[in-house]
Image (spheres, rainbow, N blue to C red):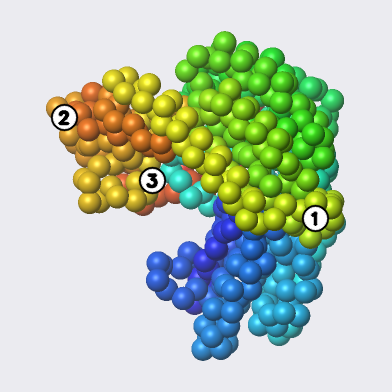
Amino acid sequence: MTRTYTIRTFGCQMNVHDSERLAGQLEEAGYSLAAEGEQADVVVLNTCAVRENADNKLYGHLGHLRAAKAANPGMQIAVGGCLAQKDRGEIVRRAPWVDVVFGTHNLGSLPVLLERARHNAEAQVEIVEALETFPSTLPARRESAYSGWVSISVGCNNTCTFCIVPSLRGKERDRRPGEILAEVEALVAEGVLEVTLLGQNVNSYGVEFGDRYAFGKLLRSCGSIDGLERVRFTSPHPAAFTDDVIDAMAETPNVCHQLHMPLQSGSDRVLKAMRRSYRSARFLSILDKVRAAMPDAAITTDIIVGFPGETEEDFQQTLEVVRQARFSSAFTFQYSPRPGTPAAEMPDQVPKEVVQERYDRLVELQNDISWQENRKLVGTTVELLVATGEGRKDAETHRMSGRARDGRLVHFTPRGDAIDRKIRPGDIVETTITYAAPHHLVADGDVLSHRRTKAGDNVEAGLRPRTKGVSLGLPSFGPKPTATVSAGMEGCSL
């Protein structure tokens, strides 16, 4: 009998993409995805160690699973990801009903570890210190029929004092350009319209093979892939941001005019304590250049409030940078210590009540700016890639949702003579913005145009891309890679 699996993912886009690779391996090993509401034979928790209360979330989930496993002794529980890399055997000590623990560097070990745990009737803990196999060489079961993650690097060479990622993901390792482009082509052959290039510091791509302009070249190469309509990337580091990347964004038609670039703090003193190798003036100058080249660019950011030693003056400097930057939105975080990071041991930890009060002020300011910026778009026509599950109130408002090219979320009314049969997630529509809120836009007029796509066909048929691993060899840029790409649901065949 085929064993079933489910994967629960915590954390960032990297974790989400890793889970796609884990699903691909399990299906290649003969497992099938458990139906919604069904208790799976194998439950995989892909963890995060960066977010607040990560430990509590993991052990809370494991506590709930204990009763399910007691009722079904054949069930297996696996824990992977960043928290597994950090806690290692501690997980099995605290939750002895866990069967497998694996880290960020050995995603490919999961099926073997599950089989070994069954055979030996004992927990298997395997954590390696360096990347065994680049995740791109592993099969993947993609979650979306219209949008795909493509990892271009893993790891990080920076030493930010608040971040534990470098110790868990290791030094930066870059994929070969040909491998990346082959994976993108494989996704496009299966109907995917949009890819997001992923890296801890995505714009430092090329450091491993000595080409500081490699990322800009990669963006331009993505522009030559037929059928690829949208290219995004996350997250660049301000210190590594070069003018050639701005030029590539502006001059490559399918690269979206959207930039997510973490600020973290507007205080130069705090940035220095964070070991962020740029200062506020440098950050704002990048934004000026981006907007000069792309006036319609939507710029988003990350900000940490209450870093150790942050004074009211430091916080006021952050507010001033936010006022000047005019972010379309911001992911704001209250600082909390992460064991194993230098910042956790710093003096002058800011009291929780002070952090909360500053956080509230920052959110109020940014919400006001976001609303002002969104109101400028009322009356404009936008192209939307129709999405699945983006609008929590879509059912009651009879709207659908999509993402504009600049990444903004738009709820629209699916009506009008231009509609070609049913609109599906993955289709492309044009519509006019009629209302703006701080975190979304609304288009309640008629749909102006509707293009049915292969991605929409696949959504309607319940199909998802399955890509095999890609490995092509030496670094190179230029013409499209000479890879054999299957148009079927098996993806790339090399």
Any part of residue 174 in sight: no
| Location of residue 349 with respect to 74 vertically, above or below | above
- Residue labelled with disc 2: 416
Dot 3: what SS? Answer: loop
| Location of residue 363 with respect to 6 vertically, above or below | above
Q: State the residue at coordinates (28%, 41%).
A: 400
- Residue labelled with disc 1: 344
3D distance between C-alphas at marks 2 and 3: 22 Å
Assess whether mark 1 and mark 2 are in contact (beta carbons under 8 angstroms). Answer: no
Residue 412, by quadrant, is: top left
In the figure, is residue 96 to the left or right of 367?
right
- Image coordinates of residue 415 in percent, x first then y, are 18, 34
Residue type at the position of mark 2? Gly
User: Quick one: 332 or 100, which is closer to the camera?
Assistant: 332
Residue type at the position of mark 3? Glu
* Circle 3 or circle 1, nearest the eye: 1
In the figure, is residue 88 to the left or right of 398?
right
- Residue labelled with disc 3: 390
- Image coordinates of residue 126 in percent, x first then y, are 79, 67
- Image coordinates of residue 125 in percent, x first then y, are 77, 72
In the figure, is residue 278 to the left or right of 375?
right
Residue 219, by quadrant, is: top right
Give the mark, 2 or 1, whose residue is nearer the N terminus.
Answer: 1
Q: State the residue at coordinates (28%, 47%).
A: 394
